Image (cartoon, helix red, strand yellow):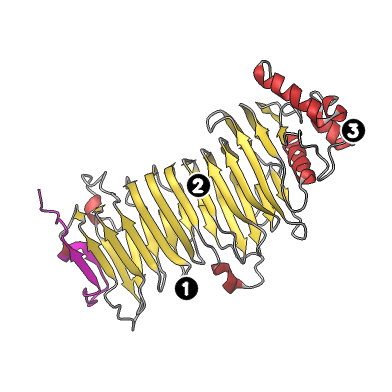
Amino acid sequence: MAGEHRDTVNRRRLLYGGAAAALAGTGTAAWASGAWDAPAAGAASREHPGYADVVADFGAKGDGTTDDSAAFEAAYAYAEKRAAGGTGRTVILVPPGRYRVTRPGALLAADSPSHRRNGLRYVGAGLRISEIVFAPATVEGPDGGSYLCRNNDTWQNISFEGLRFTSGTPGASFFYSYSTGGAANYRFSQCEWMGEWEYGVALDGSNTNSEMRWEACRVGGAYRKAFLYAGMSLHSTDVKQQDQFLNYWFTDMNVTYEWGNFLEFPYGGSVTCRSGSYIVTGRRPTPHPDYGYESAFFRFPRPAHFDGVQRFHAEDIRFELRDDAVVVIDCAWNRGTVHFNDCDDTAHAYRSFSDALRAHRYTLTDAGPLVRYDSCQLVGTHQYRTTPPATPPPCVRYDMCRLASHPPAAFLTLPPAQPRDFATFANCLPSSAP
């Protein structure tokens, strides 16, 4: 901690006050013992910068060996104490280093739904520079607590920037969020996930859990369930209200992970993915009871949802289908819209298995959903299922697409005797085109 960073921290200590200045490397112990009389909520002077450094102020080592759980717990407790009038006032700094954390909830343990807060920020030095390794001693069930972060209807507007999160215990999970209106507006910028997780972000409850952004992030590692799973139904008092999963944006992403699902929305959702590469590099080591060996980028498995929460848009994305167990989309929505624009999944069209791929799958009803592909390059065939006695109306359109494996007449995989008049091909280049 030498040099400019240490000088800046020392100047900040003076602003914190005499008690903070006396901390000097014993932040965790001082906080736990009560020796640090941190500013009471709302009492900090205007000069107080509102920054808490897990190394300089709370004694984290960041050496990859020391258990830094207590330092992160203390930093969060300090941020929680500084919140005033429902507004958060603290930025938690994570300097360069590799921080080993073993206690669930060490990064964020919010459980005060009656005292909701707004605004909390975690800032690292960069996704390959500041790394938090979550290595709990045991991995419990989905509600058992093996999450690095837990937000029980308490915080909105939480941001994570320039951080790498690694699961040091296979099957651990990154973030659990329960909401009846108090948890929403998360933002991840230039973050990365590695290791084997059960869930990346798991959403539960009702009403919101919405307005979440991922920007220039890398999703690596592997996921037994999904990187983002919206609709766990563990505690919801009104299961129908689970449909209020609205507005999730993924922009300029590098989604390159080993296996598992990227986005799974059992209860509907409004989702937009723009720009980037999406790649599954392997396959599940053992079959999953729900998925077998398959991994899916987008899985929407249930049909009935409220209007307005069955909307998916993918744009300017390059998909690499390296294995016949990779699925781009499996959608069972009974209405709503699905739109792919200027996407390409033909990178491995030359491989022997590619012609038989069915990586885009839909279940159609009398009400749709409306499915559209514009200016896309597509490999294999697209599978459309129906549930008798449904007779889908014209609801599927391919416009100016290149069909890499089959001409339009053979591009759709359908149930026996299913009419094909629900689909339209406009100005598409067939596989035989030069």
* Helix, strand or loop under label 3: loop
Q: For the point 57% across and 36% down, which residue is it?
A: 163
Q: Are there few (<14), some (14-19), or many (20+) residues within 10 Å of tag 1?
A: few
Q: How far across and down, in percent of the image, does residue 346 sit?
A: 25, 48
Q: Amino acid at mark 3?
A: Ala
**Residue 160 in the image, given as x and y percentages of width and height:** 59, 41
Residue where numbered disc 1 is placed: 307
Residue at the (23%, 65%) spot, across then down: 412
Residue holding disc 3: 35
User: Looking at the image, is mark 1 or mark 3 earlier in the sequence?
Assistant: 3
Is disc 2 in contact with disc 1, using a CB cutoff of under 8 Å?
Answer: no
Q: Is residue 432 above or below residue 193?
A: below
The magenta segment = 409-434
- Closest to the observer, 42 or 184: 42
Label 2 sits on what residue type?
Answer: Trp
Quadrant in the rendering for residue 135: top right
Q: Is residue 366 left or right of residue 126?
A: left
Q: Position of residue 391 (x, y in %)?
A: 30, 81
Apparent side of residue 298 relative to residue 404 in the rendered image (left or right)? right
Residue nearest the observer in this picture, 128 or 198: 128
Verify whether residue 423 appears in magenta.
Answer: yes
Against 307, residue 160 (above or below) is above
Does label 2 or label 1 sit earlier along the sequence?
2
Mark 1 belongs to which amino acid? Answer: Asp
Indicate which disc, 3 or 2, sits on the residue closer to the N terminus: 3
Q: CA distance from mark 2 to mark 1?
A: 25 Å
Label 1 and label 3: CA atoms lie apart by 54 Å
